[in-house]
Image: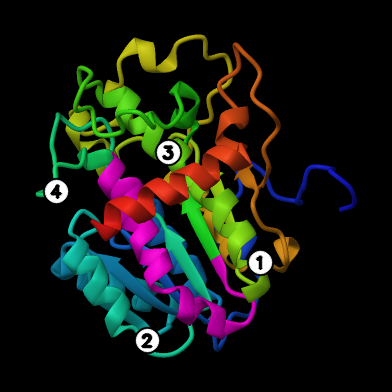
Amino acid sequence: MTGNALITTPFGAASTARDVLGGVDLTGRRAVVTGGASGIGLETARALAASGAEVTLAVRDTRAGLAAARQITDTTGNRRILVAALDLADRGSVARFAASWQGALHVLVNNAGVMATPELRTPEGWELQFATNHLGHFALATGLHAALAAAGGARVVSVSSVGHLNGGVLFDDPHFLRRPYDPWAAYAQSKTANVLFAVEAARRWAPDRIAVNALNPGRIPGTGLARHMGGGLESAPASFEANSTDVSWKNAEQGAATSALLAGSPLVEGVTGRYFEDCREAVPHRPGVRRGIAEYALDPDKAARLWRLSTGLLAA
């Protein structure tokens, strides 16, 4: 790739995580996957394990995590699958996870998330989706920065969503303290924040050789992400798909492919600060097509502003 050309790969929307990492040797690499007990997190972890990486499943429910770890070992033969407690909405839990990490960390996949929750808040008064999807992962990644830098060529993968197209970060009222709560606006800002994090982290951490990229996994029905919508993405209101003419439905293995690509494939070595979908860099969003990347999600000024906002909230 040269200049500003978009990055492409031989893989596409139908590729699976195992396809993307087939033949890739990740022996000696250590990875953390948040929400790795189910859905695309589980399949991302499985693909990394199949390539030889040591994988830590960072999960709220450690019993589910242990069951997932056994399943990964059974299907890959890799016994280096660990489980650790992590609640992204709990600052103490995130701090304990980061403090307990020993040694270098080569891959961090910020995968876990919630979507379209009722109006819920953390003890700090933070809106739950922004707190979980963005602030928790922001605190985790910054808390693990030294371990990532020690790896020499680490990768951070920020799982965003096509939902970011529904709106940007509401900088004047991110926690809906002065405006009526809208679960989809809250989800959209948290997913835009996932991309803006990648943009600013890529800039800040370039001297440490830490690559940071974001992605849209596609629409995967029946995952835990949609539990507040009746159990499946099929329950989303019509307004959520307004003006859509191009929507990709995938199974979990396909949904994990772009995460696996950014986490372990040599095809994207050195790539940073980008947004991918269907195993390639996304094109700019065009009205009427529910694909691509919104201009505001790649805005470096907004990315820097979000970093300052996040740092301030977590320091309070």
Residue behind mark 2: 79
Mark 2 residue type: Arg
285 drawn magenta:
no
* Residue at the spot of label 1: 206
Left or right of 93 in this view: 208:
right
* Placement of the C terminus among the 4 image quadrants: bottom left
Mark closest to the chain's N terminus, 1 or 2 = 2
Tell me: 228 left or right of 24. left
Q: CA distance from mark 3 to mark 4?
A: 21 Å
Q: In terms of secondary structure, where does tag 1 sit? A: helix
Residue linked to disc 3: 191
Q: Amino acid at mark 1?
A: Ala
For the residue pair 98 and 85, the one nearer the viewer reads as 98
- Image quadrant of residue 240? top left
Sequence-wise, the earlier of marks 3 and 4 is: 4
Amino acid on which disc 4 is placed: Glu
Disc number placed over residue 124 in the picture, else none:
4
Q: Is residue 6 above or below residue 201?
A: above
Query: Which label sits in the foreground, 3 or 1?
Result: 1
Give the mark toward the camera: 2 or 3.
Answer: 3
Q: Is residue 189 above or below residue 1?
A: above
Instruction: Point out the tag, 3 or 1, that comes first from the N-terminus.
Output: 3
Quick one: label 3, few (<14), some, or many (20+) residues within 10 Å? many
Is residue 140 within the magenta segment? yes
Residue at point 55% right, 21% down? 290
Residue 246 vertical placement versus 315 (above, below)? above
